[in-house]
Image: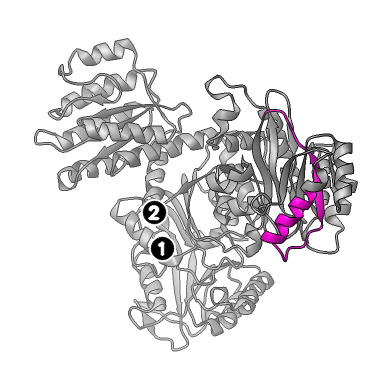
């Protein structure tokens, strides 16, 4: 695969060049003719001249060699001209033309891939905007603007959004190393391009806009590799769109909680990819990384000339899980020695509205020197005595000498415009508002915490694969396993299950209760009933004496609530008397993207509170710890307010076991343990309900 021919070609043929101004074929030639220093060959059967360049009737007529072909002809003609380009021995082709997979024309799109394989050239697109390399002044696209040369590489699945982002970058003086519109990604996707950019000396930060991903395993792998090198290149993604899920997705508690977007969230977290929520975030984060070193500690100092923005910023830093730095006594004494009496020498440092550039400069020097400060955010509001440009120059001078991360927010419009320009020219990270500044530092700190977190997952040896082969792998029918079979799957995975029996009569219920012990729980077994409690399909505190009546009570309730439901039996299970916390652990598989494992609050409140977290299979110890850290109930599990702690290690192990089952048995499409009982201290876990769906 020749990606250098895409990004650094010495010669480019534009197939579909047009003399009609405003057409795609015309704009591409125009963009190249303005700046590109390599050979440009416009191709059009009519011949002639275009922007001072001779137009060739066919690529075969070009006298020299062609490295890159940019194709902008109607879809029906693309295979023909691509074959001609292949015979010309091109190294790469960028297909601008639309009318392929995006409109359901997968057959012709596959023909393009076959031609690329036959002739050995790299295929980008189809249905894309094109490619840019600002360092070579190469704009092989129909985008009207090209950003300055810089260190940001940008890959976009959407051409239209790509043009908007390019325009945004130009207006904010942001430099690019590479730009590529991927289009339909028929042959080359993000993972392939990331490998190339990982070794590109001109790229320091990689931005992605994606609407969907196919080979997430490869993307995950390459992103982790990029993250583990000595000088990692942060990857920042803006992801839009959600794949629609079928009705089966809501047929288990885990499926109802785990939307398609949760899978992407898990992928990005585990791969060390930072997720942006809006276009501005892409460039805010990029600026922060380009102008600052990554910082592992989280202590942030705030310097402001207005109290209100400082308070807003403090709240935002807390939301980003950053810590307000505590100054040393010597730092506070130094600040007190020159700041007005009404100023605050605590963090945030409020140097008051009449602060001039000198007061800012002196404060910044002292705070930056404090060893308890890991990063700084500087706020400025334009008041009548504020020296905006002089203060900006003082910040630039501090940044030149300090290695600590700095983000600046100049609040306002015209009054701060000149100062903002100075900061941007000096390549300092700037944010429009205090909350944005906190967000930028939060992204940087989050990235630092991902470093070195690629430990392999635990592999449990005590899985009963013989049982799993029988119940899962060798089934002839797709669908939900019976409840008793689902419990057997858990046991085969090494997960403790409460003692149980299946009965189909009142007398059998009495015998089962006598065998299992009192009290017991009765649960209906039905593929048609998910919420058993709501349906009256659960009876608690059953004794041998009340067993028959309890069975009749359960069946009568089901006849009333679900008269058409198929009842395959009644599960008699030992009722747990110890103190426990109800949890849910489960897995769900997207047929195109992969599997998730989830953990959260279980029982009847699962889908009410929706306190759950997900990880992309396989999960390791670090990922499971991070998942639990995102649960609101984790403080309760670890002994909040003096209460006894629960057996969190056993919970983590069970999550890891479900992850292993989802990985080793791709036939499992959904697995739900709700509830699984988590006991206090070292009491472990016990599953009391399970659902397993296989294909």
Residue wearing tag 2:
279
Which of the two residues, 139 or 163, is positioned nearer the viewer here? 163
Mark 2 Cα shell of 10 Å, populated few (<14), some (14-19), many (≥20): some
**Corner quadrant of residue 525:** bottom right
- Secondary structure found at label 2: helix
User: In the image, which residues are magenta?
Assistant: 551-579
**Corner quadrant of residue 576:** top right
Asked if the magenta segment contains residue 568, the reply would be yes
Which of the two residues, 499 or 646, is positioned nearer the viewer here? 499
At horizontal 60% and vertical 33% (from top left) the residue drawn is 452
Which of the two residues, 226 or 616, is positioned nearer the viewer here? 616
Q: Give the x, y percent position of residue 365.
A: 27, 22
Asked if the magenta segment contains residue 529, the reply would be no
Q: Give the x, y percent position of residue 560.
A: 68, 60
The answer to whether any part of residue 96 appears in the image is: yes
Residue wearing tag 1:
161
């Amino acid at each position: 695969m020749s990606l250098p021919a895409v990004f650094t070609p010495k010669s480019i043929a534009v197939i579909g060049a047009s003399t009609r101004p405003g057409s795609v074929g015309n704009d591409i030639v125009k963009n190249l003719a303005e700046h590109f220093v390599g050979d440009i060959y416009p191709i059009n059967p009519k011949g002639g001249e275009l922007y001072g360049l001779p137009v060739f009737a066919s690529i075969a007529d070009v006298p020299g060699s062609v490295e890159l072909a940019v194709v902008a002809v109607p879809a029906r003609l693309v295979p023909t001209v691509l074959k001609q380009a292949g015979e010309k021995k091109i190294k790469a082709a960028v297909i601008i033309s639309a009318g392929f997979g995006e409109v359901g024309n997968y057959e012709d799109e596959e023909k393009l891939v076959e031609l690329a394989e036959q002739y050995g050239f790299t295929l980008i697109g189809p249905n894309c905007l094109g490619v840019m390399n600002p360092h070579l002044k190469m704009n092989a696209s129909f985008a009207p603007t090209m950003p300055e040369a810089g260190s940001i590489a940008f890959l976009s699945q959407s051409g239209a959004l790509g043009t908007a982002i390019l325009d945004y970058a130009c207006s904010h003086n942001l430099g690019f190393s590479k730009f590529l519109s991927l289009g339909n990604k028929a042959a080359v996707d993000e993972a392939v391009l990331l490998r190339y950019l990982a070794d590109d000396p001109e790229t320091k930060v990689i931005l992605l806009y994606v609407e969907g991903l196919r080979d997430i395993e490869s993307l995950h792998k390459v992103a982790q590799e990029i993250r583990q090198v000595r000088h990692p290149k942060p990857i920042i993604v803006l992801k839009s769109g959600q794949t629609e899920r079928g009705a089966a997705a809501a047929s288990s508690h885990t499926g109802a909680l785990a939307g398609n977007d949760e899978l992407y969230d898990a992928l990005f977290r585990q791969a060390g990819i930072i997720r942006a929520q809006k276009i501005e975030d892409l460039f805010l984060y990029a600026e922060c990384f380009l102008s600052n070193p990554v910082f592992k500690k989280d202590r942030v100092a705030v310097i402001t000339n207005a109290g209100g923005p400082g308070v807003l910023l403090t709240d935002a830093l807390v939301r980003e899980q950053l810590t307000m730095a505590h100054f040393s006594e010597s730092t506070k004494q130094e600040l007190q020695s020159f700041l007005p009496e009404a100023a605050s020498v605590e963090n945030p440092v409020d140097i008051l509205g009449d602060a001039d550039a000198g007061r800012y400069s002196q404060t910044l020097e002292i705070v930056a020197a404090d060893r308890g400060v890991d990063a700084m955010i500087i706020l400025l509001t334009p008041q009548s005595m504020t020296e905006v440009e002089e203060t900006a120059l003082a910040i630039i001078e501090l940044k030149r000498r300090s290695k600590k991360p700095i983000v600046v927010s100049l609040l306002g419009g015209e009054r701060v415009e000149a100062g903002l320009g100075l900061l941007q020219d000096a390549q300092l990270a700037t944010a429009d508002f205090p909350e944005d500044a906190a967000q930028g530092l939060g992204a940087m700190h989050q990235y630092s915490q991902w470093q070195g977190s690629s430990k392999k997952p635990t592999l449990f040896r005590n899985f009963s694969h013989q049982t799993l082969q029988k119940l899962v792998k060798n089934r002839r029918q797709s669908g939900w396993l019976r409840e008793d079979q689902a419990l057997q799957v858990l046991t085969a995975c090494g997960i403790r299950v409460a003692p149980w029996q299946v009965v189909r009569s009142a007398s059998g219920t009495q015998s089962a209760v006598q065998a299992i012990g009192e009290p017991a729980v009765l649960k209906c077994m039905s593929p048609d009933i998910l919420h058993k409690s709501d349906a009256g399909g659960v009876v608690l505190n059953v004794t041998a004496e009340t067993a028959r009546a309890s069975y009749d009570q359960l069946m009568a309730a089901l006849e009333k609530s679900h008269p058409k439901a198929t009842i395959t039996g009644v599960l008699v299970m030992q009722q747990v008397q110890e103190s426990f916390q109800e949890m849910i652990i489960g897995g769900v598989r997207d047929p195109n993207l992969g599997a998730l494992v989830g953990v959260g609050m279980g029982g009847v409140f699962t889908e009410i509170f929706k306190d759950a977290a997900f990880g992309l299979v396989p999960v390791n110890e670090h990922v499971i710890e991070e998942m639990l850290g995102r649960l609101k109930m984790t403080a309760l599990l670890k002994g909040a307010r003096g209460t006894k702690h629960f057996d969190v290690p056993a919970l983590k192990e069970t999550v890891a076991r479900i992850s292993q089952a989802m990985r080793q048995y791709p036939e499992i499409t959904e697995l739900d343990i709700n509830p699984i009982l988590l006991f206090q201290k070292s009491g472990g876990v016990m599953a009391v309900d399970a659902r397993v769906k296989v294909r």
